[in-house]
């Protein structure tokens, strides 16, 4: 836990980081998006067709998430600049359901704001609140359209049965009135996402949602087509899949996306496990396709899987990878954790900054959330909150300082084509 002495250090570091990026956090009601909307204007730089894509002219956008309580905690710690973006998640099939708090939309069926938050065990979600509480941060939405709890729903979606839900999504995007990155059917190749294994129906669903939003004249969103880039997926599948078979086409994709959780060259060590493509190799595959298609890349989900930054430990994540989850625990120093996971992560980004233009980090106590905590049915995830350890926080602030990284603020909005 952060002591009073540590808090002083953290606040000093935060001041340094804010000065270095030239931004300050919003402090008055005048900065509220409700009182001070944004007027779209043409953006410069790398602009794909047909959408602008909200691609920074230079630098890499730093997005934080993945639930609103975790991002609030990060802000309350006083550690860091305002995020360049906030991650949230929506369940498309629940956007008209009061019982599920409208799928995390933050609006009811009539478009009125609602205070109720959605929490399926993986963190509290409310897209409208996230957008309004962080007015000078972009919004990154993970749109769940899986059939995990909705068998055959993708077929119904492309038949028009959920058009009213897409209308609700459009209302939310238009309401926040700032750049929105929409990750439709994220981690399409993940074995844990049912329904996407039918490549063509996934493509049809992706295109259908985009077409409907365009018909509604929703013009402040960019699409992100996100692969899981997960060695664990290849272990489960027993093979490596060609992500190109899910590609919806250049007219529908503004950004390519990936996830990053394991160590950069980590291999399975579980008994009987065989070598698979590493995190580095799977991400290389996404970057190669992005360069071919002339698209930017967003590392749309990232965190040091199975590390606990508060306890300074590393444990097994999953039986198929390294052993029963939360066993095999090793105590490490903060610097050892940084060198094992963070330094290779930041080095990779620096080496590929020509195409990696956004990075979304998950700063959360996964172990405290029912979906990810004991009995670890989805593996052991740990605690990835960057502000709970001074040494890791110091390294983080140094790694994300300077003109190569974009944090929240008026200048960010201007660069992305929105004038405060």
Image (cartoon, rainbow, N blue to C red):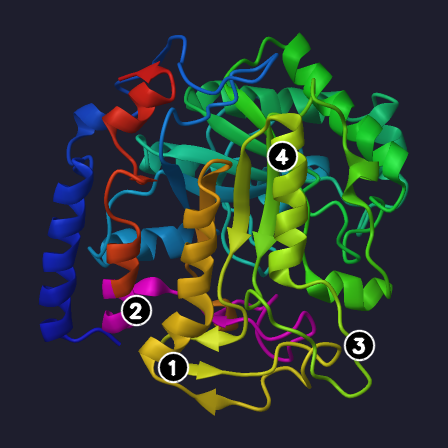
The numbered disc on residue 290 is: 4
Q: Which sits earlier in the primary sequence, circle 2 or circle 1? A: 1
Say if 320 sits above or below 243 in the image.
below
Quarter of the figure that contains the N terminus: bottom left
- Mark 2 closeness class: few <14, some 14–19, many ≥20 residues within 10 Å: many
Quarter of the figure that contains the C terminus: top left
- Residue 12, visible in the rendered structure: yes
- Secondary element type, mark 3: loop
Image coords of residue 92 (percent x, y):
69, 36
Q: CA distance from mark 4 to mark 3?
A: 29 Å
Q: Which sits earlier in the primary sequence, circle 3 or circle 1? A: 3
- Bounds of the magenta segment: 368-394
The answer to whether residue 390 is magenta is: yes
Q: Which sits earlier in the primary sequence, circle 4 or circle 2? A: 4
- Secondary element type, mark 1: loop
Say if 274 sits above or below 109 in the image.
below
The numbered disc on residue 312 is: 1
Query: Is 400 positioned to the left or the right of 86 in the image?
Result: left
State the residue at coordinates (40%, 14%). Answer: 44
Say if 110 sits above or below 307 in the image.
above
The numbered disc on residue 392 is: 2
Q: Which sits earlier in the primary sequence, circle 2 or circle 3? A: 3
State the residue at coordinates (19%, 29%). Answer: 29
């Amino acid at each position: 836990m952060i002591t009073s002495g540590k808090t002083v250090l953290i606040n000093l570091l935060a001041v340094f980081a804010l000065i270095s990026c030239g931004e300050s956090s919003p402090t008055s009601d005048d900065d509220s998006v409700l009182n001070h909307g944004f007027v779209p204007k043409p953006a410069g730089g790398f602009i794909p067709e047909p959408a602008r894509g909200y691609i920074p002219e230079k630098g890499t956008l730093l997005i934080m998430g993945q639930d609103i309580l975790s991002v609030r905690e990060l802000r309350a710690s006083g550690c860091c600049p305002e995020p360049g973006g906030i991650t949230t998640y929506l369940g498309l099939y629940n956007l008209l359901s009061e019982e599920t708090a409208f799928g995390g939309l933050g609006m009811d069926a009539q478009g009125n704001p609602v205070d109720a938050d959605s929490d399926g065990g993986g963190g509290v979600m409310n897209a409208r609140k996230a957008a309004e509480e962080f007015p000078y941060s972009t919004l990154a939405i993970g749109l769940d359209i899986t059939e995990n709890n909705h068998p055959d729903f993708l077929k119904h979606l492309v038949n028009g049965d959920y058009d009213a839900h897409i209308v609700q999504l459009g209302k939310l995007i238009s309401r926040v009135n700032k750049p929105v990155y929409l990750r439709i059917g994220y981690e399409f190749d993940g074995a844990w996402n049912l329904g996407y294994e039918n490549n063509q129906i996934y493509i049809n669903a992706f295109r259908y949602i985009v077409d409907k939003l365009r018909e509604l004249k929703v013009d402040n969103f960019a699409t992100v087509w996100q692969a899981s880039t997960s060695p664990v997926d290849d272990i489960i599948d027993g093979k490596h899949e060609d992500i190109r078979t899910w590609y919806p086409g250049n007219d529908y994709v503004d950004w390519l996306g990936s996830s990053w959780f394991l160590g950069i060259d980590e291999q399975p060590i579980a008994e009987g496990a065989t070598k698979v493509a590493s995190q580095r190799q799977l991400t290389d595959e996404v970057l190669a396709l992005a360069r071919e298609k002339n698209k930017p890349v967003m590392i749309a989900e990232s965190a040091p899987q199975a590390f606990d930054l508060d306890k300074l430990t590393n444990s097994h994540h999953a039986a198929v990878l390294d052993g029963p989850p939360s066993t095999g625990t090793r105590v490490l120093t903060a610097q050892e954790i940084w060198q094992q996971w963070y330094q290779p992560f930041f080095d990779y980004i620096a080496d590929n900054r020509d195409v990696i233009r956004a990075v979304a980090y998950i700063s959360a106590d996964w172990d405290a959330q029912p979906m990810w905590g004991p009995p670890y049915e989805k593996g052991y995830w740990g605690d990835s909150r960057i502000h709970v350890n001074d040494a890791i926080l110091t390294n983080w602030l140094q790694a994300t300082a300077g003109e190569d990284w974009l944090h929240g603020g008026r200048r960010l909005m201007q660069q992305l084509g929105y004038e405060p």
